[in-house]
């Protein structure tokens, strides 16, 4: 087990990933939950990730708000499912059995972010994370860092939810 995280796998409940807190405040550099989406690697601060579960059917809702596809019944809690593909301007695709749902905390609410895969939990050194101003200040990107398998863009979920739409290829955004 990685000393930077506490991972609990409970049958039927998915994997809950929580940062391990020591007596001092944790660096903002990590740990991160790294996930793949559309062939790219992204990361969320582990502190905003409640759990990761296998992708299941989402209940559609009539006339959903932009970037939301429906709701997920997660052990009696109805959570909105965020359409991150359209938000990033990626082409839509059917949910696959290998996909995962990342349940995140954004402010005082929880929501579901569908991803292609969850890669791992990593904790780069704070000096290894380049701030967004050096990379890309849009799309809620907070920074980036290098891994053996490429660059990981660190995503700030709260900022990302507040941004205007990004048009999908060949279409218009919500």
Image (spheres, grey):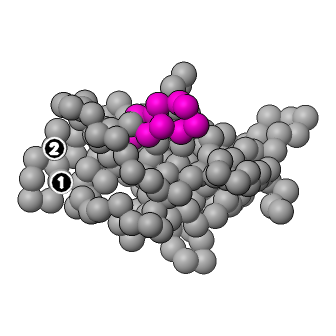
Residue at 26%, 50% in the rendered image: 86
Decide: is 12 above or below 63: below
Magenta span: predominant SS is strand
Q: Which residue is mark 1?
A: 168
Residue closer to the observer: 127 or 47: 47
Q: Is residue 68 magenta?
A: no
Q: Which residue is mark 2?
A: 173
Estimate how packed mark 2 is, as few (under 14), some (14 to 19) or many (20 or more) residues with alpha carbons within 10 Å: some
Seen from this angle, which residue lies furthest right?
A: 23
Q: Position of residue 102 (x, y in %)?
A: 52, 49
Residue at 58%, 37% in the rendered image: 75
Q: Magenta region: which residues? A: 72-81
Displayed quadrant of residue 66? top left
Displayed quadrant of residue 28? top right
Q: Position of residue 51 (x, y in %)?
A: 62, 46
Residue closer to the observer: 39 or 125: 39
Secondary structure under the numbered disc 2 in the rendered image: loop
Disc 1 + disc 2, Cβ < 8 Å: yes
Compare marks 1 and 2 and give the one earlier in the sequence: 1
């Amino acid at each position: 087990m990685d000393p930077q995280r506490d991972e609990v796998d409970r049958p039927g409940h998915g994997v809950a990933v929580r940062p391990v807190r020591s007596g001092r405040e944790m660096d903002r550099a990590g740990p991160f939950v790294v996930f793949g989406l559309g062939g790219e690697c992204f990361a969320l601060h582990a502190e905003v990730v409640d759990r990761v579960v296998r992708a299941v059917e989402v209940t559609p809702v009539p006339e959903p708000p932009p970037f939301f596809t429906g709701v997920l019944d997660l052990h009696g809690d109805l959570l909105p499912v965020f359409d991150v593909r359209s938000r990033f301007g990626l082409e839509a695709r059917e949910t696959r059995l290998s996909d995962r749902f990342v349940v995140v905390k954004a402010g005082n609410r929880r929501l579901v972010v569908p991803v292609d895969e969850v890669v791992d939990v990593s904790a780069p050194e704070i000096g290894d994370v380049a701030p967004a101003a050096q990379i890309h200040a849009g799309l809620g990107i907070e920074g980036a860092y290098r891994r053996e398998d490429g660059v990981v863009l660190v995503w700030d979920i709260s900022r990302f939810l507040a941004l205007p739409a990004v048009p999908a290829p060949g279409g218009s955004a919500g």
